[in-house]
Amino acid sequence: MQRNIINRHVRRTSLVALTMKDSIRYLMTSVAVICSFTSALFLPLPLLADGRPYTVKQNNKVDSDTFIGYKVYRTWCARCHGTFGQGLAASDLTKTLKNTDRDDFFKIVARGKKGRIGVMPAWQSNDNVMKNRDRIYSYLRARADGALGAVTPELID
């Protein structure tokens, strides 16, 4: 009788241990999949052969990444930096981006910046801005390089 009770207890604890082991394995696999997926979101966009992160064709038609950058910029940045990056309450990005590389741009977007004009907020907690910062950079770089005038861009067909 006592032996049966002990055997049942051993079987139950073995099942709990097995279930826990499977749960941990499942959790670790899930975390690995999520990490690999989210890291792909923050990979930089490829540069073109000439080093530009954008494509602008005649009639201000741009590639899809630059167009998305324009849309996100209009939503989150234009209220301070102006519709076309020309500066309103904040700095003229068509000028400042001529002397700002991609890494510095990313740091400023994430951490914010205190400047002569005022304070730019940190956007690191805004997933929409952070996952599209490369696209925003492409859009603003096209403006700063003069490849895209002060007009609303269109998507390349």
Image: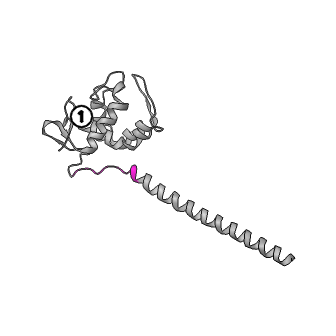
Q: Which residue is mark 1?
A: 143
Q: Is residue 152 above or below residue 131?
A: above
Q: Residue 58 appears in which quarter of the rendering? A: top left
Residue lying furthest right in this view?
Answer: 2
Q: Position of residue 95 (x, y in %)?
A: 27, 30
Please name the predominant secondary structure of the magenta segment in the image: loop
Taking depth in this image into account, of 153 and 115 the one nearest to the observer is 153
Residue drawn at x 52%, y 62% is: 29
Q: Is residue 51 left or right of residue 27?
A: left
Taking depth in this image into account, of 37 and 16 the one nearest to the observer is 16
Taking depth in this image into account, of 53 and 75 the one nearest to the observer is 75
Identify the magenta region. Answer: 40-48
Q: Residue 127 appears in which quarter of the rendering? A: top left
In what quadrant of the picture does the C terminus appear?
top left
Q: Is residue 32 left or right of residue 65?
A: right
Residue drawn at x 33%, y 34% is: 73
In what quadrant of the picture does the N terminus appear?
bottom right
Taking depth in this image into account, of 68 and 77 the one nearest to the observer is 68
Callout 1 secondary element = helix
Q: Is residue 37 above or below residue 54?
A: below
Q: Is residue 44 magenta?
A: yes
Residue lying furthest front in this view?
Answer: 1
Q: Position of residue 78 (x, y in %)?
A: 33, 28
Q: Is residue 122 magenta?
A: no
Residue drawn at x 23%, y 50% is: 48
Residue lying furthest left in this view?
Answer: 58
Q: Position of residue 123 (x, y in %)?
A: 44, 35
The crowding category of the residue bearing disc 1, from other C-alpha atoms within 10 Å (few below 14, some 14 to 19, many at least 20), is: many
Question: Which residue type carries mark 1?
Answer: Arg
